[in-house]
Image (cartoon, rainbow, N blue to C red):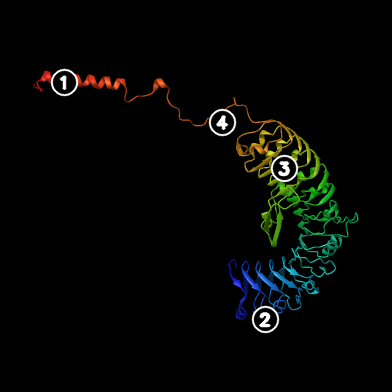
Amino acid sequence: MNNKLSGPLTEEVGKLSNLVDFDISNNEFSGILPNIFVGLTKLEFFSAESNRFTGELPASLVNSPSLHMLDLRNNSLSGSLNLNCSAMQNLTYISISSNQFRCPTAGLWNCSRLDAIDLSFMNLNCESSFNFKNLQSLTQLSLSKASMHNLSATLKILSHCRNLGTVFLSMNFHNEEMPQPPSEGQDLEFSNLKVFVLGNSQIEGSFPAWLRGCKMLQMLDLSRNHLTGSIPSWIGKFNNLYYLDLTNNSFTGHIPQSLTMLLSLQHKNFSLEGTPFAFPLYAYGSGNNTFKRTITYKKVSSFRPSLLLSYNKLEGPIWPGFGNLKGLHGMDLKHNSLSGPIPWQLSSMTMLEILDLSHNKLSGEIPQSLVDLSFLSSFDVSYSQLHGEIPTKGQFDTFPPTSFEGNKDLYHGSISDSSFTPSPPHVTRSPPHHEKLEIIGFPFWFGGVAGFFITIAMCFASGWVFL
């Protein structure tokens, strides 16, 4: 793996009968996958990720009885995914994302031992073929950017997978309505859901009420949609929630005060930290409706504990109780209509690295206590209505002027105050004209002549010189 090997894959590999792990990922192999797997009777793991393979899957691969994990993502494979799960009874993991396969056939849904499925970044464009009801062992699923439609039907099907803990559905269901089941919430039940990602889909409607029953939820991403209404107060009752991204929506009203009481962020207790995802989760930078960056996350701990509510229509105060969230690393509230002062209690958020409160209607002074945030690496309060003196010392000495611009009554300390006066630059000064030291001048010549005549006179007096 991770070499620059190219050309077709030789059929000689099929003679390695004792091969258990076969990883040729991140190379430049091309052509079709040879029909060599019938002889690899002990093969448990096969990865051809990120190569240039084309064509259909060989019969010996989709009938391999020993295979546990199959990773073929980032190739140009096509045709039908005709897995024979009657033969592949040990298969627990499959990733075929970023290929050109057609809709999965019924064979995939008969693989009852599957624990993780990645069908993302493919033009599946099929709804009726998906049937997850038999996959009771399934815990992780990614269908991101798979040309999916009918969100309501998809969620209803997935709710039959009682052990499902991680679901990625981003970049699908464009402009559809967020389903809102009856008040009893019995239509959609995800009691084991821990990670739910449904971003960048321009989905309309309100905050999904069916999430209320997801008591184990730890990460929630509904960013870059068209959701409206208020953020429900019950979101703060999720004891394990530590990552919430609702950026780029149209939520209104106050920030729920219950968010200041998230137990996982108060006690720095992240039960999934370090747990790997079965497949990479692609996350995108927030700030507008276009992707700024693409980052691959392979474990939960890659996501810093964050509260991301920027680019909405939220108003009201920033609650002092946010100071209770000592485990929070990132707090982004920019581009809202928040008002009132910046609470000095935010200085208690001892792990905070990013604090962005810019483009709001905040008033008052920047609390001097914020200089105690020793991990703070990014701070922005620009374009608000703040006044008074900008704190100095600590991390505040590293923040650029752009962090404070757009506040006409905000200023740096007085020049008369020694704590704000910069040290003068070192300048090499010439001494005044009357202090200049002249090595050759009138005193030098006068002394030299006088000394010469005195020396001659002494020589005559001692008799050393005779005429």
Name the element at disc 1: helix
Q: Which residue is mark 4?
A: 422
Residue 436, picture quadrant: top left
Name the kind of residue labelled 2 in the image. Val
Name the kind of residue labelled 4 in the image. Pro
Name the kind of residue labelled 1 in the image. Ile
Pair 4/1: label in front: 1
Pair 2/4: label in front: 4
Seen in the image, is 9 located left or right of residue 226?
A: left
- Quick one: quadrant of the C terminus? top left
Name the element at disc 4: loop
Residue at 65% x, 81% y: name it: 39
Rendered location of residue 152, percent (x, y): 86, 60
Residue at 29% x, 22% y: name it: 444
327 relative to 210, above or below: above
Pointer 2 with pointer 3, Cβ within 8 A: no
Residue at 71% x, 42% y: name it: 356
User: Residue 136 versus residue 466: which sits nearer the camera?
Assistant: 466
Pointer 4 with pointer 3, Cβ within 8 A: no
Q: Which residue is mark 2?
A: 38
**Distance (Cα) linking label 4 and label 1:** 63 Å
Residue 352 visible from this viewpoint: no
106 relative to 341, above or below: below
Earlier residue among tags 4 and 3: 3
**Distance (Cα) linking label 2 and label 3:** 59 Å
Q: Which mark is residue 324?
A: 3
Earlier residue among tags 4 and 1: 4
Pointer 2 with pointer 4, Cβ within 8 A: no
Label 2: few (<14), some (14–19) or many (≥20) C-alpha neighbours in 10 Å: some
Q: Which residue is mark 1?
A: 456
Label 3: few (<14), some (14–19) or many (≥20) C-alpha neighbours in 10 Å: many
Residue 5, picture quadrant: bottom right
